Image: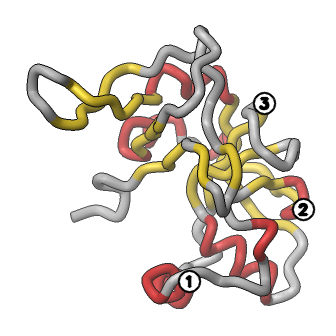
Amino acid sequence: MEWYENHHHVCRYDKLYGNWQFPRSDGRLDCEYRLYIQKILHLLTDSKLETIDLCDIAWIGKHHHPHNPGTVWSNMKYQNADPSYPGIILKNAPNPYNNKYRMIDGRHRIMRLLNQGETSSQYYVLDYDEIKEYIVEKVFCPVEKKMVLKKADLS
């Protein structure tokens, strides 16, 4: 199995990490979105690689770094993180820090880079509008009586 299979960026409100939702066209809150990395692999080309200042990137848990690294599972991911592989970030995407970029893949790699004293790194930079069509919403289906994924209704 490849690393990206079933790997996804979760976009939701969290009491600990803040509001990582994408805005809906109807203004409704309380939604959970997912962006599956496998769906955007074709966008990750060499022409999208840029050297980015790490301080310009919003990432889940940024306000806790370096004091609260997370769970044991998260720490295992940190130990296995290879910062030589570029992360994926979005420009023009909403984020709770109002940073220029929003990370969608590479949180453990950025923590490792920062802990090593690095100030910049290579990232695949995509525009938010470019990936909207690949975002899905997790919703309850009363007919099937379970959570399902449907195309997100974003503004």
Q: Which residue is mark 1?
A: 78
- Residue drawn at 62 percent across, 46 percent down: 46
* 30 relative position to 107: left or right: left
Q: Confirm or deny contact between disc 3 and disc 2 (CB under 8 A).
A: no
Question: Where 143 falls versus 97 (above or below)?
Answer: above
Where's residue 22, x and y in %? 62, 30
Question: Where 8 falls versus 39 (above or below)?
Answer: below
Tag 3: residue type? Asn
Question: Where 1 falls versus 128 (above or below)?
Answer: below
Q: Residue furthest top?
A: 26
Q: Which residue is mark 2?
A: 55
Between 41 and 100, the residue placed more toward the observer is 100
* Residue 15, quarter of picture: bottom right
Q: Which residue is mark 3?
A: 92
Between 85 and 75, the residue placed more toward the observer is 75
Quadrant showing the C terminus:
top right
- Residue drawn at 36 percent across, 44 percent down: 38
Quadrant showing the N terminus:
bottom left
Where's residue 31, x and y in %? 49, 32
Question: In terms of sequence position, does the residue under pointer 3 or pointer 2 come before the other?
Answer: 2
* 152 relative position to 60: left or right: left
Where's residue 35, x and y in %? 46, 39
Dot 2 alpha-carbon crowd within 10 angstroms: few under 14, some 14 to 19, many 20 or more: few
* 155 relative position to 55: left or right: left
Dot 1 alpha-carbon crowd within 10 angstroms: few under 14, some 14 to 19, many 20 or more: many
Question: In terms of sequence position, does the residue under pointer 2 or pointer 1 come before the other?
Answer: 2
Question: In terms of sequence position, does the residue under pointer 1 or pointer 3 come before the other?
Answer: 1
Tag 1: residue type? Tyr
* Residue 26, quarter of picture: top right
Tag 2: residue type? Cys
